[in-house]
Image: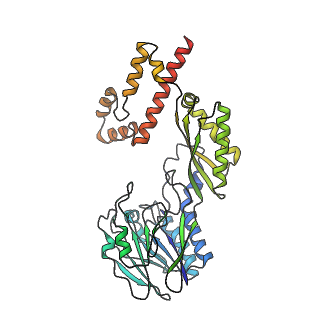
Amino acid sequence: MFKFLHAADIHLDSPLTGLSQHDEAPTETIRVATRSALTRLVDSAIDEGVDFVLIAGDLYDGDWKDFSTGISFNNEMRRLDAQQIPVYLIYGNHDAESRVTKSLQLQDNVHVFPTQEPETVHHPSLPVSLHGQGFATQSVSENLAENYPQPSGNRYNIGLLHTNLGDREGHGNYAPSSLSQLVAHGYDYWALGHIHIREIHHENPHVVYPGNTQGRHVKETGPKGCYLVTVDDDLKTCQCDFIALDTVRWENARVDCSDLVSEHALLDAIRIQLNKSLAKSDGRLLAVRLTLTGHTGLHELLHAEHSRLRAECQNIALDIDPELIWIEDVRVRTRTLINPEDLAKQDALTAFVLDALKAFDPNKLPSSVDTLVKKLPAEASRALRKSLEPQNEQEREAMRGEISAIVLQAIATSNSTE
């Protein structure tokens, strides 16, 4: 029997995005999170007594700011070398962006597979053959797996591959492959990378994405880590156990406001949700995006006083645990109880405004704004247009909801004071 760790998408020293606008953000903790996850990966390898470690691409996150990124990785590999644990590594699309990577020598226990053609490596003391090929350039469109060698006889065969399996939407279609192709190839275990969600697509043979080792933003939620794989004496994969490595855990938490009739009740509901979320984070820093939903009489208030609401939520988080919970954002996705059709019956002007609101298209800038944007230099025009126009259907609905709330509240308030 032997054991190994399968990790991928470490994105070591991945730059922070969007935190500069949050003065209260735990920037330093998040900044070192990818390094901390790598340290935990090495800790797990040593504690579990594994025979080797696999890293299936995107060890780095593009070009380094300085050599400290490579030095940090080498320091961790040195710890594995001291325990005689080899590491098998392929480079992915983000690794191919780096120019500095190629000029810093790696530890002797790290084997990097070539980028021009696949290579087979035999473990020095186990009946294990490893096959792999890295990315030579940032964008690899060909199916690399097609050229992987046939499995070695009477050995446990592992394929390391950085790939978009099955043309997954929302991911770069790099080195595309299909599940049927990998299953038919004859390997015992496909150690995949590139997709940041852990998934076991097939068993015996195993086709596995471990996900990334550390979530880097609110779109990468939940536990992140690696797989501990156990192979029995008959060279059959008998167990795949997930090991969480993340030190910062991101979460989208939703609070249904449908039955809430006061701001006090809302804040109590938020406190309850944050406590539930924190209880599941296992002592890690929890970075939370709160989303308020439901049809509620608080809808107009939530939009009108969004900044104060966010401050109240941050205050609750600090009260619960200032070291372990941080509010990344508060999104209001509630719906009004005000009936626009009832308002439209009151007078012609109100009906006209509501008709215009119904026809509003967030995808189209007002003509006066569009004219000004077109007069800007091309690069500035693209950047400004990107910031003004919603990027997806979710953003479009959010913008439409916010504008509707402002207009309806203004009309309702005006009518109540007349």
> Is any atom of residue 346 visible in this view?
yes
- From the viewer's perspective, is residue 245 above or below residue 4? above
Left or right of residue 210: residue 245: right
- From the viewer's perspective, is residue 120 above or below residue 20? below
Residue at the extreme top of the image, as rendered: 418
What colouring does the structure picture have?
A: rainbow
Left or right of residue 339: residue 280: right
Question: Which is nearer the eye, 104 or 238?
Answer: 238
| Image position, residue 409 (x, y; %) | 52, 23
| Image position, residue 320 (x, y; %) | 70, 46
Residue 193, quarter of the rendered image: bottom left
Which quadrant of the figure contains the N terminus? bottom right
Left or right of residue 45: residue 209: left
Counting every numbered tag in the picture gives: 0
> Is any atom of residue 105 visible in this view?
no
Question: Which is nearer the eye, 96 or 329?
Answer: 329
| Image position, residue 356 (x, y; %) | 38, 23
| Image position, residue 410 (x, y; %) | 51, 21
Question: Which is nearer the eye, 96 or 347?
Answer: 347
Which quadrant of the figure contains the C terminus? top right
Left or right of residue 399: residue 147: left
Question: Which is nearer the eye, 137 or 188?
Answer: 188
